[in-house]
Amino acid sequence: MSRRRRPLVPGARDGLDQLKAHVMNQNGFKIDSHHPEQAKVEMANEIGVPLNKGDNGNLTSREAGKVGGPIGGNMVSELIKMAKNQLNRPE
């Protein structure tokens, strides 16, 4: 698949992967938290984008956005919801 970008905070990859699996499971996908890369494959299969294991340089920007956009968008929405809950929590 595509190259993996490094998170800004060292050691945050595991937490982000768990969040991805959690969010995708909430949206009806069965994603194992130990293999969050399945999220892209599941999303691509659902929308009919030909995603292959390894290099996907043949995908158009539109196809890549259809796969990654909803995943990232749902993760951001979940992070915002978590932050709001944390701000509303009394100390």
Image (cartoon, helix red, strand yellow):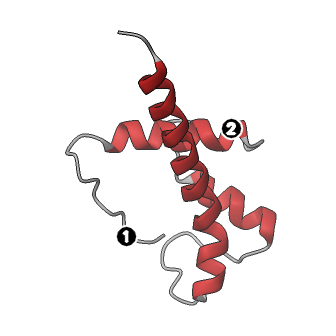
Between disc 2 and disc 1, the foreground one is 2
Q: Which residue is mark 2?
A: 25
Q: Residue at x 79, y 73 (%)?
A: 48
Residue 10 in the figure: left or right of residue 62: left
* Amino acid tagged 1: Arg
Q: Residue at x 51, y 50 (%)?
A: 76
Q: Which residue is mark 1?
A: 3
Give the CA separation, mark 2 to mark 1: 24 Å
Question: Pointer 1: residues within 10 angstroms few (<14), some, or many (20+)?
Answer: few
Q: Position of residue 9 (x, y in %)?
A: 22, 46
Q: Quadrant of residue 17?
A: top left
Badge 2 marks a residue whose secondary structure is helix
Question: Pointer 2: residues within 10 angstroms few (<14), some, or many (20+)?
Answer: some
Residue 51 in the figure: left or right of residue 18: right
Q: Does residue 4 sit above or below 22 in this rendering?
A: below
Q: Does residue 47 sit above or below 90 in this rendering?
A: below
First in residue order: circle 2 vs circle 1: 1
Looking at the rendering, in which quadrant would you find the C terminus? top left
Q: Position of residue 72 (x, y in %)?
A: 54, 57
* Amino acid tagged 2: Asn
Q: Residue at x 58, y 66 (%)?
A: 68
Residue 78 in the figure: left or right of residue 67: left
Q: Position of residue 70 (x, y in %)?
A: 64, 60
Q: Position of residue 63 (x, y in %)?
A: 66, 81
Q: Residue at x 50, y 41 (%)?
A: 80
